[in-house]
Amino acid sequence: MTLPRLVPPAAVDATATAALRAEVRGFLAEQRAAGAFTPSVDAWLTGWDEDFTKALAAQGYLGMTVPLEYGGHGRSFVERFAVTEELLAAGAPVAAHWIADRQIVPSLLKYGTELQKREFLPRIVRGECFFGIGMSEPDSGSDLASVRTRAVRVDGGWSLSGTKVWTSGAHNAHAFIALARTAPVDPDNRHAGLSQFIVDLRGPGVDIRPVVSMNGAHHFNEVILDGAFVPDDMVFGEIGAGWRQVTSELAFERSGPERFLSTFVLLRACGEKTAAQQIPRDAGLGRLVARVAGLHQMSTAVAGALERREPADVPAAVVKVLGTTTEGDIADFADVLTDATTDPSLAELVSKAVDQRPGFTLRGGTNEVLRGVIARGLGLR
Ligand SMILES: Cc1cc2nc3c(=O)[nH]c(=O)nc-3n(C[C@H](O)[C@H](O)[C@H](O)COP(=O)(O)OP(=O)(O)OC[C@H]3O[C@@H](n4cnc5c(N)ncnc54)[C@H](O)[C@@H]3O)c2cc1C
């Protein structure tokens, strides 16, 4: 039996983005010198800094793949990948625009109407419009087809009612794309009858309640939709095609460098402290560096596949399972290696990494579920 290839060939020439990477590193060094940010763990999810987002926009680092006609920069997906990888490796606070730039841009380009593209893309490129993801519900996470939020046809649009949960950044975002049921469940095809809507998070019928994490941070929310009105021109894609649309978005959500670099600043700090003989030498450090290097190659290969518009859901699942496991292992490694005598800045990185660790393998699809996707890709189920 010959198993199919799990990750696309690495057809990306690293030298092609070397100058761009150097430019981003120069910009980040300037920003750090100016005190614009302190490198942090998991900063792509928790580092909400709209000023930093504006500074990135001014450099042309937002909406890089958006065509010029929509105010973007018309650059390649691989160039965007290089920029985001540099930002993540530096632990820069990129959460404000992350979801909009990562998955709303490609989704709008694929499914958005001309009006929606003109409404949102230029504002995303300028760092002025932030999005959330409205998929999970109290009884629906891994099994998204079970969402209960309902959209009912009303004069001029749709009325949405239901509860979304774990909605990252909803309290700061302008809108989210909600997945809702527009037709009753068909037991023979549970994926039918789902649709997507662009919901104004600051509009009537939307109540955003904080879900405070155990470390006291307010990152998540519960979003209660109580007859929230969505006009016809904010229906996203086709009514009834929500499942197909959502699943095509997932390769963008799962394969990127944020799935293996969330704790990179901590790994780097451990390397520097080891070199300075401030923490004990440990062979585990080299193993983790090697894993990150391998993940960089795999994630780059998926970026190349996305550029070529090849289906990439299975390779994206592979990157996410291996990458998020590595992020957690870095947190555990640093936690064991360091102690109360560790300097405060490293101790803070360790503490935050350990706090955030449980979410790494859950968000964007759990590792158990993704292993099922991989098994299906291998033809094993
Ligand atoms: C940091 C973070 C940020 C998030 N941000 C967002 C967001 O912005 N928007 C949003 O919509 N959601 C968000 N989520 C929610 C996330 O997508 C869900 O937590 C995830 O999809 C899992 O769903 P659940 O929590 O309902 O767990 P469940 O689906 O209830 O799963 C519980 C356990 O059962 C296992 N399991 C479930 N089904 C299977 C199966 N078929 N085979 C094997 N094992 C299975 C799971 O792996 C898991 O271990 C976020 C989550 C985290 C941690």
Image: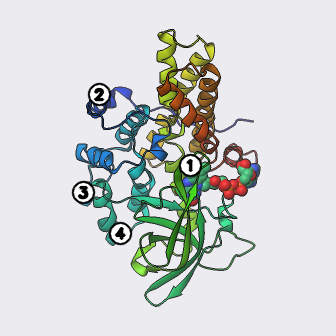
Q: Residues within 10 Å of mark 3 (few under 14, many from 20)?
A: some
Q: Earlier in the sequence, mark 2 or mark 1?
A: 2
Q: Residues within 10 Å of mark 2 (few under 14, many from 20)?
A: few
Q: Which residue is drawn at 38% across and 28% down?
A: 14
The image position of residue 332, as x and y in percent, is 64, 28
Q: What element carries label 3?
A: loop
Q: Is residue 364 visible?
A: no
Pointer 3: what residue? 71
In front: label 2 or label 1 = 1
**In 3D space, how far apart are the residues under numbered discs 3 and 4 (Cα atoms)?**
13 Å
The quarter of the picture where residue 85 lies is: top left
Compared with 245, 11 (above or below) is: above
The image position of residue 44, as x and y in percent, is 45, 43
**In 3D space, how far apart are the residues under numbered discs 2 and 1 (Cα atoms)?**
37 Å
Pointer 4: what residue? 116
Q: Which amino acid, by three-letter code, is at mark 4?
A: Gln
> Does label 2 point to a residue whose CB lies under 8 Å from ligand 1?
no
**In 3D space, how far apart are the residues under numbered discs 2 and 3 (Cα atoms)?**
25 Å
Q: Earlier in the sequence, mark 1 or mark 4?
A: 4
Q: Which amino acid, by three-letter code, is at mark 3?
A: Gly
Lateral position of residue 329 relative to residue 124, left or right = right
Pointer 1: what residue? 216
Front residue of 195 and 225 = 225
Mark 2 touches mark 3? (CB < 8 Å): no
- Which colour style is shown? rainbow
The image position of residue 54, as x and y in percent, is 28, 49
In front: label 3 or label 1 = 1
